[in-house]
Amino acid sequence: MRALVTTTQWRDHGHQLRDAAPEIEFLDMEDDGTIRRDGAVLEREETGAEIAFGSTDLFDGDLREDKVRHFFGWLLGNESLQWLHMAAAGVDNPVFGMLLDNGVRLTTSHHTAIPISEYVLAQVLRARLPLDTMEADRASQTWRTRQWDEVASSRWLVVGMGAIGQEVAVRARAFGASVTGVRRTPTGDEQVDAMIGPDAMLDALPDHDVVVLSVPATAATEGMVDTDFLSRLAPETILVNVGRGALVDEDALRSSLDEGRPRRAVLDVTSTEPLAAGHWLWSHPDVVLTTHTSSGGRQRVERAAAVFADNLRRWSAGTPLTGEVTAATRNAPAPP
């Protein structure tokens, strides 16, 4: 049995992975697609493996597009692949559907929920506290008193109560906010003040100061933030999207922002990534745009390796894997 990991992952966590499954032989892939075993370069026909780990470093650095292309190209060309573990929660890319259709088991990790939730809280604080104008006063040496809307007692609607939504709710409530969660099938242990289903979401929008999107892109959620959704937001609402760009109709968002609602749209994801230079989202005064980087907490790397190591133990023992996704549960939008 063989497993493919990146060279970075093997360098940093190889001992941990080998300890988890000493009977598995590990291959490692360099950024340029070269695959080695114990330091020796393998020919293409020698690189088959039953297991692969799509680790966090694939999506970091200047070579990220090349690294991803090499890795996913190997996945699609490897007929012996039985299980892919991704250090990510989103599986809307069509490649994952192709692998599932080919009988490959797919597992994911929610190790980024902590940094993403911290990002959400930071952006909401930044939107409500006039930190930029305070800094401008300091720069101009102007002594001026400022006022702002506190996060305490604010009302949050968190759409999607998976790992990310749960962490967002915990942090918002720690600041004294009240949180309503939206989830199709509540578990009963959500850390919120109230739970509603998707059918009640639109009616709830006007009553909330902050709306956070933390759902995956599925057939049910694609384009959910449309003209009707946006028209129901209170003018002072802060809209935060840390789910997928496909959730938001960007033309409808532009029209709504130009009409004065929401007060601010915080977007870490866009419908097309990377976003083209000159796109209106870069420069709109009521948009805070970041480059799909809300998950960037450094500590996530250790958590991701630990989740994969745990699943390696489970694989070896023949016990259920954590975070498994099936064709039915993936339910992603149809590819374009």
Image (spheres, rainbow, N blue to C red):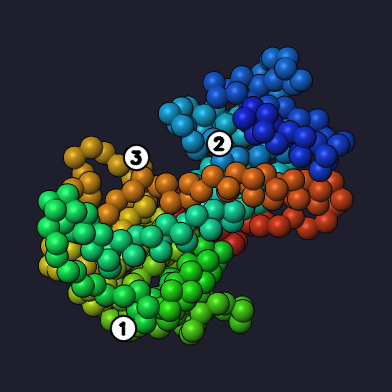
User: Which numbered dot is residue 143?
Assistant: none
| Image vertical order of residue 288 relative to residue 198, above or below | above
Figure check: 242 above or below 272 = below
User: Which residue is pictured at 74% across the width and 45% down the height?
Assistant: 309
Residue 273 is left or right of residue 88, and the answer is left
Q: Nearer the viewer, residue 78 or 279?
A: 279
Q: Amino acid at mark 3?
A: Pro
- Residue tagged 2: 57
Label 2 and label 3: CA atoms lie apart by 18 Å
Q: Amino acid at mark 1?
A: Asp
Q: Who is closer to the viewer here, 120 or 269? A: 120
Can residue 32 be seen by looking at this rendering?
yes
Q: The N terminus appears in which quarter of the rendering?
A: top right
| Residue with the mark numbered 3 | 274
Among numbered discs 3 and 1, the one appearing first in the sequence: 1
* 1 or 2: tag closer to the N-terminus: 2
Q: Earlier in the sequence, mark 2 or mark 3?
A: 2
Q: Amino acid at mark 2?
A: Asp
Q: Secondary structure at mark 1?
A: helix
Foreground: disc 2 or disc 3 = 2
Q: Viewer-proximal residue, 212 or 41?
A: 212
In this rendering, the count of numbered labels is 3
Residue 198 in view (yes/no) = no
State the image coordinates of residue 251 (x, y, percent, origin top left). Answer: 21, 57
Residue plotted at (53% across, 58% down): 114
Within-10-Å neighbours for mark 3: few <14, some 14–19, many 20+: few
Viewer-proximal residue, 189 or 101? 189
The answer to whether 251 appears left or right of 72 in the picture is: left
List the residue tagged with mark 1: 207
Disc 2 crowd, CA 10 A, few/some/many (<14, 14-19, 20+)? some
